[in-house]
Amino acid sequence: MTSTDVAREALPQRIKRIAKRRLGPFGVFFEGFLRHPVMVGSIIPSSRFTIRKMLAPVDWHTCKLFVEYGPGVGTFCRPVLDRLGRDATLIVIDTNDLFIEYLRRTITDSRFIAVHGSATDVEEIVRAHGHEKADYVLSGLPFSTLPDGVGPAIASATHRVLRPGGAFLVYQFTSAARTFMARHFRRIDAAFEPLNVLPCFLYWGWKEDAEG
Ligand SMILES: C[S@@+](CC[C@H](N)C(=O)[O-])C[C@H]1O[C@@H](n2cnc3c(N)ncnc32)[C@H](O)[C@@H]1O
């Protein structure tokens, strides 16, 4: 291999590195999308309008454990940490190691735990970090494109891991998640956020006190 070949081979890597540095979290998110387009399901992180609307019904005073599925580059993590009590914890779970590595490097808050894994294993993950139940679970997962059986498994594990009175918060480009949620949550509040790329559906599935 000549030195020209080496230089030519290294060029795409160099462009990627420069683009990532210039674009910051957007660059990391785009690279994560290029690596796993179906699992990521979007090329642009959620808007501040979606974040504000999605988190509005959360009772931060009683929240001790907040769990997030599919944090990506942490679009929701910072707003959640801003609202979360000093003795509370945020556990985020993502299958994409690029995102988890980025979050561990950029969010140094002691209340923050980033786990490389699947939302299907939320119960084991919550227990492994010393908790029995979660108060709220937030999901940015692309339910409509997840492999067969994964969506229903996640909805059912989420219902089990929530404490009575807690809620499953879901935002999505399609209404697919609602179908999975409806099997477990009797009360589902819904909204729509047009100021997001793409506009998205928002759902809050409440685990009723009687559901144990
Ligand atoms: C649309 S992105 C969400 C981005 C981010 N939350 C936001 O608001 O901009 C979906 C994320 O779900 C992750 N994901 C897909 N399947 C998953 C699973 N089974 N468990 C955990 N994360 C998963 C992807 O890696 C990706 O980070």
Image (cartoon, grey):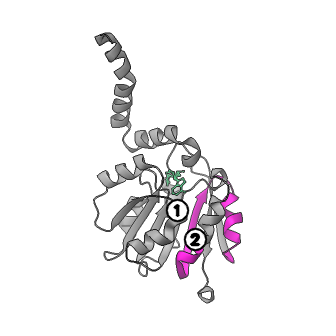
Could you classify mark 2 by the number of other residues whose Cα lies within 10 Å: few (under 14), some (14-19), or many (20 or more)? some
Q: Nearer the viewer, residue 35 or 2?
A: 2
Which quarter of the figure is the N terminus placed in? Answer: top left
User: Pointers 2 and 1 in contact (CB under 8 A)?
Assistant: yes
Using the numbered discs, state the Cα–Cα distance from disc 2 to disc 1 in whole angstroms: 8 Å
Q: Amino acid at mark 1?
A: Ala
Ligand 1 is within 8 Å of the C-beta of the residue at disc 1:
yes
Which residue is disc 1 drawn over? 119
Q: Amino acid at mark 2?
A: Ala
Residue drawn where x is 49% and y is 48% of the image = 45
Mark 2 vs 1, N-terminal side: 1
Please say whether residue 178 is one of the residues in the magenta stretch: yes
Q: Is residue 8 visible?
A: yes
Q: Nearer the viewer, residue 185 or 9?
A: 9
Looking at the image, residue 177 sits to the left or right of residue 115; the answer is right
Residue 96, position in %: x, y? 46, 49
Residue 23, position in %: x, y? 38, 37
Looking at the image, residue 95 sits to the left or right of residue 142; the answer is left
The relative height of residue 23 versus residue 208 in the rendered view (above or below) is above
Looking at the image, residue 96 sits to the left or right of residue 170; the answer is left
Q: Secondary structure at mark 2?
A: helix
Which residue is disc 2 drawn over? 157
